């Protein structure tokens, strides 16, 4: 079970902190890989962290789950927080 679903059992609908990662993947022409999401919008591959994962581990796992690609040598670009 994903960690956030486990937390929801205890906190209900109260706010929780959900760390995660998104990955910008560029090809040789500097084009960005986007994926069409279930809601019809386009976005970067990524997702929420599971208990015990690092940001790098969640980034690699989510890219593989969503695209089938294996990524290495990741570079942290920024950290965003808040709304």
Image: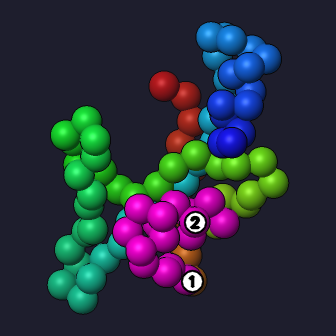
Give above or below for 16 relative to 55.
above
Residue positioned most to the top: 13
Q: Earlier in the sequence, mark 2 or mark 1?
A: 2
Give above or below for 32 relative to 14.
below
Q: Is the N terminus in the top left, top right, bottom left or bottom right quadrant? A: top right
Could you tell me what secondary structure mostly forms the magenta stretch? Answer: helix
Q: Residues within 10 Å of mark 1 (few under 14, many from 20)?
A: few
Q: Nearer the viewer, mark 2 or mark 1?
A: 2
Chain part drawn in magenta? 57-72
How far is disc 2 from disc 1 in space, using C-alphas?
Answer: 14 Å
Residue positioned most to the front: 1
Residue 5 % position (x, y): 66, 31
In reply to whether residue 61 is colored magenta, the answer given is yes
Q: Residue at x 42, y 74 (%)?
A: 68
Q: Quadrant of residue 41?
A: top left
Q: Residue at x 20, y 74 (%)?
A: 31
Using the image as rendered, state which of residue 37 and residue 16 is in the foreground.
Answer: 37
Q: Residues within 10 Å of mark 2 (few under 14, many from 20)?
A: many
What element does badge 2 sit on? helix
In this figure, which residue is indicated by the disc labeled 1?
73
Q: Residue at x 23, y 79 (%)?
A: 30
What element does badge 1 sit on? loop
Residue 28 % position (x, y): 24, 88
In this figure, which residue is indicated by the disc labeled 2?
61
Residue 14 % position (x, y): 66, 11
């Amino acid at each position: 079970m994903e960690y956030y679903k486990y937390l929801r059992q205890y906190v209900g609908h109260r706010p929780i902190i959900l760390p995660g990662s998104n990955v910008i993947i560029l090809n040789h022409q500097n084009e960005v890989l986007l994926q069409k999401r279930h809601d019809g919008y386009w976005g970067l591959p990524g997702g929420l962290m599971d208990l015990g994962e690092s940001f790098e581990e969640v980034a690699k796992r989510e890219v593989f789950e969503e695209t089938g690609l294996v990524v290495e040598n990741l570079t942290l670009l920024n950290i965003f927080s808040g709304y």
